[in-house]
Amino acid sequence: NAGVTQTPKFQVLKTGQSMTLQCAQDMNHNSMYWYRQDPGMGLRLIYYSASEGTTDKGEVPNGYNVSRLNKREFSLRLESAAPSQTSVYFCASSSGLWNSPLHFGNGTRLTVT
Amino acid sequence: GNSVTQMEGPVTLSEEAFLTINCTYTATGYPSLFWYVQYPGEGLQLLLKATKADDKGSNKGFEATYRKETTSFHLEKGSVQVSDSAVYFCALSSRMDSSYKLIFGSGTRLLVRP
């Protein structure tokens, strides 16, 4: 029962470097999401993909890009990392039906120095 | 816009004590309400949900009732255990153009001492 798998678990970047966070789900879910978690601020939505082939901005999209590679995979890219992007990043998926729960991965802890 | 407000933590209790974590919300329409739990080093897991007014969600001894008149969804448990130590998030569903998202509160850390 893998559920939602995120890689890597930890990453340290220097300012200006780029990287891609990977996410895959094996539940045949239509919708996928990227959130960031910061102390005292809960989780904030970065981007989401309602279905394969579509992506849309969430609350805090600046500095990020996403790709819905296929139904299973949804990646998040930082083109030029900044210290303000130091955070824990969570990928989630859902069936997309109203009121269906989100299933979360275990997160990627990113530090930008 | 839609939002969720949770009581600030940490909440520290002794084992077998009664737990209440307050959650209030602001929303248009009729959102569904959720409680998620996050154990150290893990992602969020759904704890319980309620989809309409007066519904009670329950799981693992936790309960929460959807109160439309007070716009609240407080989490309760009659007797907490050390294993309940975690961060608890209240959330509401909010429609987007082609899907929906969850809007989360800031989280409440619970620490249960033996």
Image (cartoon, coloured by chain):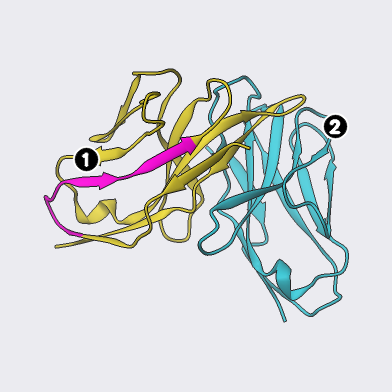
Chain colours: A cyan, B yellow
Image position of A94 (left or right of B97): left
Mark 1: secondary structure:
strand
Q: CA distance from mark 2 to mark 1?
A: 41 Å
Asked whether residue B19 is drawn in magenta, I would say: yes
x and y, in percent, of residue B82 in the image:
21, 56
Q: Relative to the observer, which residue lies in front, A11 or A58?
A: A58
The total of numbered circles placed on residues is 2
Chain ID at mark 1: B
Mark 2 — on which chain does it sit? A
Position of B82 relative to B71 (above/below): below
Query: Counting other residues with Cα less than 10 Å from the Cα at mark 1, is it few (<14), some (14-19), or many (20 or more)?
Result: many
Q: Main secondary structure of the magenta part?
A: strand
Task: Inspect this view and state whether residue B85 appears.
Answer: yes
- Is disc 2 placed on a helix, strand or loop? loop
Q: Amino acid at mark 2?
A: Thr
> Which range is magenta?
B13-25
Query: Is residue A17 shown in magenta?
Result: no
Q: Amino acid at mark 1?
A: Lys
Residue B77, disc = 1
- Residue visible at 73% across and 75% down in the picture: A83
Residue A54 is tagged as 2
Q: Specify the farthest residue to the left.
A: B16
- Between B67 and A78, the one lying in front of the other is B67
From the top left corner, tell me how far across and down residue B40 is, in percent: 42, 60
